[in-house]
Every structure is written in structure tokens, then in C-alpha cells.
Amino acid sequence: MRFGVRLRGQIHTFTGYRSVHSEHMEPVKGGIRYAMGVNQDEVEALAALMTYKCALVEVPFGGSKGGLRIDPREWEEHELEQITRRFAYELIKRDLIHPAQNVPAPDMGTGEREMAWIADQYKRMATTDINYRACVTGKPVNGGGIQGRTEATGRGVQYALQEFFRHPEDIAKAGLSGTLDGKRVIVQGLGNVGYHAARLLSEEDGCKITGIIERDGALIDESGLDVEAVRNWIARHGGVEGYPDGKFVRDGAKVLEHECDILVPAAMEGVIHLDNAARITAPLVIEAANGPITAGADEILRQKGTVIIPDMYANAGGVTVSYFEWVKNLSHIRFGRIGRRQEEARHELIVNELERLSADRELGWTLSPGFKDKYLRGAGELELVRSGLDDTMRTAYQAMREIWHGREDVTDLRTAAYLVSIARVAASYRAMGL
């Protein structure tokens, strides 16, 4: 679609897209990205990927995707709001935004702010729809969002790696050993996904972030970079150049080839291609971005023995928690609100009894320090969201793994992921009599 918006004293025309790939389940789901590279082929390809991604992680949505050809950095906030609201208007009047038919989410170049504008625009146009907040996900928490959504894709990458490292046979296939602790990780793109993945892997799993690649270059430090400090530096200076710790490399793409244990491409598609695939040294690549490895590069890496955890699984954390947010919006109550205190009261009965028994000196035992506080704390929304995401990532990996190890003609996780997904989509169509 094309639409005009009066800005800066003249009419500016914008080109936007929304593609629906499969309606085997409705609503269909997929992000809206703001980037100058947005085009019809890209949006259609990403819509197809969403179909398979949702099927793989058993989220009951079809596949869709949207995009607007715009550089959001060129516009002021109030101008972006005008553009976003007009784009949303064009989509809503075609039923391409609707709680029961098509539910967008943030993608590259968009975030909570844009989703809040879209939700408000939908509310203005559908004044009697009580479920209006479910028309988009990725909203701010005070605007109908859910706790844990912003970090969801990055945390999903962390949970995917944690599940991979629970299987010694899989670790050995990648030529690695041990646990995530101490593993050298290079992350490309310190945006929403890359930042949270890098931060969580370093803070909670003991990984060393030895390389960070950004638009203006890259940083390398074998002793490990401080992800939070680098993120703050980028926010102040617009890039990594000049950061006081680590070695700056002007040609950031070269750092993709740098020696490490785990490579996390979390930026654009097609960054690992025929020209550089043979020089990628990481034994394990996890696709945090959509389509960062081209088909030709994928073949080269597989022949080398590189294990690739595919995008349709690795970055499915976002759509999983979007599903939780959509359910929350339809049920009109936050998770944990009804049962949390009752759960805590039951736990308190047990703790009180244990404390009474531990006071008996003849038994000679006491409660561990901190046990009472940890056991008594009932699960709130954030804990439940993380629990649901962890369960989703574990279950999906096991479904892929079963085919990866169970069939001689399947030698990689991507093929296994497609087999699981397509079988589930086909089963949905069969159940509909199609």
C-alpha cells in the first residue's frame, strides 16, 4: 500500500506492506519492521518463516509479516507517530490488524512505543471491541503489555542454548564439551535481541562475550566485554568506536570469522554468505536474527561440520511471549493475580511445620539459609512468563532433536525444524478438511 502524510509543510508518500502466508490457524502473527530495505519479497519470505516458527513452538497462529520502507532515525517522534497511525489506519480498514484475524508485533526499527500507537489507533476505529488491546503485542506493560516481552527473544536464545547444552551428544556434534560456563561468544548486533541474549548469557550462564559487532565496526576482548557498558556507550555515541576497553576493528564483518565457541548473528539477514562462509570458525552458530545465513552459506557450513541452531526455533521467544500477551489481553487479567497468594499460603504451612520440626534439637537439622524466602515466594507474571518460555523452548528443541537423531536422511537441525513445522501445518489443514 502507498499513503501520504503531511509533514514538514509537504506531502510525503510512504510504501508499506503486510503479507499473510498461512491461515491454517487464526489470527495470523508477525512483526512490523521499519527499514529502508523493506520490500515485497522480504515481507513474504518472513511471513512464511512465521508460519513455520509458530507451528514449531506450538503457538496457535498463522504466519504474517509487515514492513514500512522508512528510516525511523530520520523522523522526530511526533512525525513517526503520525506516520505509524496512518499506516495502522490503512491496515485496520483492510482487517490486516484485528485481534481475531491479524496481530502484529514489533520488529526491526519498531518497539513498545509504535505498538501502543497502533493499539490506540485500532481502539479509535473499533470503539466497541472490548478486546482491542489484543490487536497487537509487544505493547508497554502499562498499555496492556506483559512483563518479560521486551527481553523475550533474547531470553529465548539463552534458553535454546541451555537446552542444547543439556544433551552431551549434541554438544559433541559441535566439537564442544562441558557447559555454557566459560564459552567464548561473539554477538553481531547489540539491538534488542542481541543485547538481551549477550547480557543473559554472560550474567547467568558464565559465558565470555569476546566480540560485539555493530554498524560502525566491532570490539574484541578475549577476557570478555562488559555488555551493559558497551550498550551504554553505543547509546551515547551511536557506535562502538572509541570504546575504551577491547580492540576496535573497523571492518566489523571480519569479526564474524574470528575464533569463538558460539556465534550469535542478531542483526540483519544474509550476513553469512558464499563469500565468507568458508572462513567462519565458530563450531556452533545460533541464528538470533531472521535468515542471517544464506542457503549457499548454510550448505558450506554444514559440510564443515558446523552445527546451526536455526532462526525459526532460536528466535521464537518473541512470538511465544507475544502469544502469552495476547491470551492475557483476551482474558483481561494478569497472570498470577488469582492464584499467587493462595500458593504462598500453602507453602507457608509447610515452612511453618518444617521450622517447628527443626526446633527439635534431637532431630539435629535446620533449614538452609534463604530456603524460606525462596520457597514462600509465589510466581508472579514475570516468573510465569519465563517458565512458559523455558518450557516452550525445551519442548520444541526435543521435537527437532528426535528427528535430527532419529532419521538417517536428516543431518541438520534446520531440516528437522521444517519437518516438524510442516507436519503440524499439514495436520491443521487436514483437520479443517482441506
Image (cartoon, grey):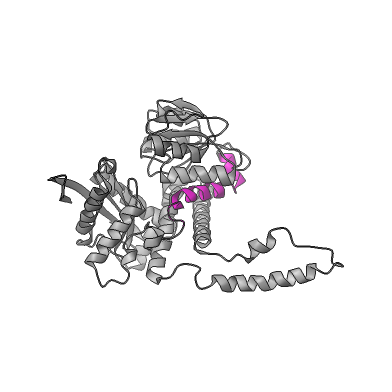
**Horizontal arrangement in the rendering, residue 86 relative to residue 277 (left or right):** left
Region rendered in magenta: 148-173
Q: Does the rendering let one see residue 409?
A: no
- Nearest to the observer: residue 354 or residue 422: 354
Across and down, in percent, residue 39 comes to 24, 44
Q: Nearer the viewer, residue 162 or 10?
A: 10
Say whether residue 234 is visible: yes
Residue 127 occupies which quadrant of the picture?
bottom left
Q: What predominant SS class does the magenta segment belong to?
A: helix
Which of the 4 quarters of the picture holds residue 95? bottom left
Look at 45% across and 31% down and name the residue there.
256
Tell me the residue at 45%/26% (across/down): 248
Provide residue 224's location: percent of width, then percent of height: 55, 34
Q: Who's the residue at 22% across and 49% down the image?
A: 16
Q: Residue farthest to the left? A: 10
User: In the depicted view, which residue is nearer to us: 324 or 290?
Assistant: 324
Q: Residue at x 57, y 72 (%)?
A: 341
Q: Position of residue 87 (x, y in %)?
A: 22, 54
Is 243 rendered above or below residue 10? above
Q: Is residue 318 magenta?
A: no
379 sits to left or right of 427? right
Image quarter in which the C terminus is found: bottom left
Residue at the farthest right position? 362
**205, 74: nearer the viewer:** 74
Q: Position of residue 374 (x, y in %)?
A: 64, 61
In this figure, what is the number of numbered marks?
A: 0
